Image (tube, coloured by chain):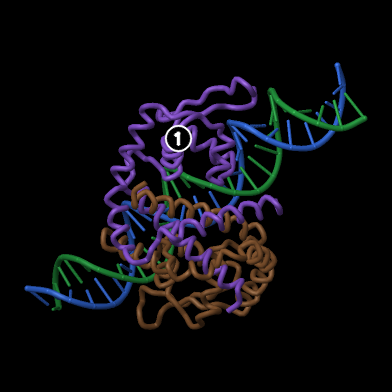
Chain colours: A brown, B purple, C blue, D green
Amino acid sequence: MTTESRLFDLFNEIGIIAQLSGTMFERVMPDGMTLAQFTVLNHFVRLGGEKSPAQLASAFQVTRGTMTSTLQKLEAKRLIEMNPDPDDARGKRVKITDMGRRMRERCIEAIGPSLSQLVGEFKGIGFETLIEPLREIRTRLDSARNENG
Amino acid sequence: MTTESRLFDLFNEIGIIAQLSGTMFERVMPDGMTLAQFTVLNHFVRLGGEKSPAQLASAFQVTRGTMTSTLQKLEAKRLIEMNPDPDDARGKRVKITDMGRRMRERCIEAIGPSLSQLVGEFKGIGFETLIEPLREIRTRLDSARNENG
DNA sequence: CTCCTATGGTTTGATATCGAACTATATATG
DNA sequence: CATATATAGTTCGATATCAAACCATAGGAG
């Protein structure tokens, strides 16, 4: 069992967890909200301010095309607002609306019970200690990607 | 910052890593091989024997419909063989072919350099200690899903 | 034996994502 | 200033996945 194949195992577990948790959440989300849409709203509530679509795409590691699609869905539901960037005629500025804030609250309430149940199930695993190393892995994975292009 | 939102952060990191690593691998895979297809071949080489499509779907936590699609692709490329289960007229038995074994080798060679590079990038993180807790999380996540189903 | 529920596998329709091509604007270089 | 290159955002075609509905067979209950 080489180190390389251990790393492959790691990515394998991560892939399965991502799929399971993603579909689990989307099943309980209200109003056809997807995880991607919720994540954008959550980002704005937690960090405030405005962001460009490109910044959001980079933050969540999706392509700009994907982010365009996600933002269009959110805008159609009036959960975000998009305006031209006054300093850059190519760019847009995205911000959350009051409806968006309320929808984010509804989502949190909807997924709350599932999350609480899982917090119970995960007692003894110490999942909180996993976050930092995973964040580090994500960061380096992203730089490796940018280096190779 | 509640425990629940920490758990959400964990799933968030996991989702991004899954996306990055998945697309990174599929970019270098030969002959249109997907991660899902490779994972099936890899499973057979490592564990040997025959499996039913339902067993494979359960092992990789995808729906039977998804596994049907994956197996059809593999069978069309002659990388697996599917035969009726002699003990259950509903079922099928799946096994890898010699071409499948060779293709798996090609895939491993193709992703080898990327994996080695990442092993280098991840020096100091101790990623190997993450595998067990993540496997545990995956298992409990799956049981929680089956309970609520 | 007969029905009734569970399971194996497939099909279908919807959707999120990717990569690549495209337009428009910004920035650097000569 | 002019041209070349980089970046912002969108669109398009392909594909993997899911959920739900479907058919066939298994296994148990009466």
Chain at tag 1: B
Q: Is residue A65 above or below residue A129?
A: above
Which of the image's four quarters has the C terminus of chain A?
bottom left
What residue sits 31% from the left and 47% below the top? B111
Q: Residue at x 42, y 70 (%)?
A: A59
Q: Which x, y percent locates residue B145?
A: 65, 53
Q: Identify the residue at horizontal 58%, vertical 58% (top origin).
A: A21
Does residue B113 appear in the picture of this structure? yes
In the displayed structure, A16 sits above or below B45; it is below
Residue A72 showing in the rendered view = no
Front residue of A94 and A147: A147
State the SS at label 1.
Answer: helix
**The disc labelled 1 sits on which kind of residue?**
Phe
- Residue C24 percent across, percent down from the top left: 33, 69
Left or right of B12? Residue B27 is: left
Query: In this figure, which residue is indicated by the disc labeled 1?
Result: B44
Q: Residues within 10 Å of mark 1 (few under 14, many from 20)?
A: many
Residue B15: horizontal and vertical position, in percent? 49, 60
Horizontal arrangement in the rendering, residue A133 relative to residue B134 (left or right): left
In the rendered view, tell whether residue B24 sits above or below residue A33.
above
Between A89 and B15, the residue placed more toward the observer is: B15
